[in-house]
Amino acid sequence: MRIIVLGGAGDMASRAVRELAAEPEVTALTVADCNVQAAERLASELGDRVSAVGVDANDHQALVAAIRGHDAAASGIGPFYRYEARVAQAAIEAGVPYVSLCDDYDAAQAVLELDGLAREAGVTVLTGLGWTPGLSNVLARKGAEQFDQVDEVNVAWGSSASDSEGYAVILHTLHIFTGRVPSFQKGRLVSLAAGSDKEVFLFPPPVGRVNCYHLGHPEPVTLPRFLPGAKTVTLKGGLSEQPLNELAIWLARLRLTDTPAKKDALGQLIKALLPFLSKLGQAEEPCSAVRVDVGGWTDGVYRQVSYGAAAHMPDLTGLPLAVGTLMLARGEIDMPGVVAPEACIEPEPFLAELERRGIQVQDMTGRWPEAIAVEAFPTPLALAFAAVGMWLIFRWLRRK
């Protein structure tokens, strides 16, 4: 089979590339990236079946040409709020099944609008198959299958900032802490303030307890669509380094992240400062985790089940993408249109493939989050960094 990984030299997608390169059935693997040198370095490490090509996601025709002729296309091109819909549209035009790591709620909403186009072309577009969304969605379906009627799905993630240092991850973090974000409550999609309603969630070790907040992710957008009957779908997340949560919240409240230009400028600053910032409340063992709590009814009795998993972010993110790409290329997922993982992936075979690769799902039923009060004021450290960020952005904007 022939596979192309777009953005394949990036922090997350490169993990999928390495996994796919180890599969004997993959006869040709193309690492496509705007950073041609990085793509070539990665390809040179992985043998003759792997090649590199330059690709610009802003060049539609070149993107279509790069994708055409493959059995599946996987994408790690971020930030997804800029690129998911346009890359998916190129895959549809190329007639190639597509799967991505898309983890931005507005990007998920945009790509779902391509459903009719994908159906007409007979192409499967599987959006959001990484850590969260992705593994989280499959665990939500696993939980939902335990009930006659699913009632609620509550997804949470916790991560150490030092578990990944990719620029796209920084932009994503700024984006999901900004403005108002979707949550599905009482049977309808509502808009909540990002960074609100703090809770402490218990994740599998070594992550443990993390302060989590309403953030902008696709699960509240897709799970109600593909798991009908759910009245509540929430997504909360947070960093193990609590000062960084506070910093992200207050940067957003000071309107330093409310435009793409501001996110880019601030992202570059944070990227430079990350070696220092990640030491603020640094976890003993940097790691990432997901937790999914599902409630529902069986024979008139309400109960809840919970699942969790912990691993390093590139594994949690890249391995689901690799497994999903193989399933698409084999034809094991064949559902023309735009779908999310909960719509087309059987949990047990998929989770078995992840376990074979070192990601083990734990049953966490009965180990619940704890609600705690939200601080009304920022810490001095968060305000100091916010002030520095504002000054640097204003200087940057004046030069434009």
Image (tube, helix red, strand yellow):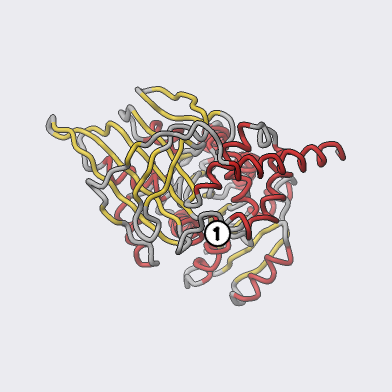
Q: Which residue of the protein is positioned furthest toward the front in this rendering?
A: 380
SS state under label 1: helix
Residue 212: x and y in percent read 44, 42
In terms of image quadrants, where is residue 165? bottom right
Picture quadrant where residue 255 is located: top right
Q: Is residue 204 above or below residue 337?
A: below
For residue 261, above or below residue 76: above
Query: Residue 101: percent from the left, percent from the top?
Result: 53, 49
Q: Position of residue 304 (x, y in %)?
A: 23, 40
Query: Where residue 326 appears, x then y in whole percent?
Result: 46, 59
| Residue 322 seen in render | no
User: Is residue 110 visible to us here?
Assistant: yes
**Label 1 sits on residue:** 162
Question: What residue appears at the point 59 percent right and 45 percent down from the top-left corner?
Answer: 172
Q: Residue at x 39, y 36 (%)?
A: 223
Q: Residue furthest right?
A: 399
Instruction: Pick the residue in front: 359 or 49.
Output: 359
Q: Quadrant of the C terminus?
A: top right
In the foreground, 89 or 167:
167
Asked whether, in this view, residue 90 is left or right of residue 20, the answer is: right
The answer to whether residue 214 is above or below residue 9 is above
In the image shown, does 374 or 11 lie closer to the viewer?
374
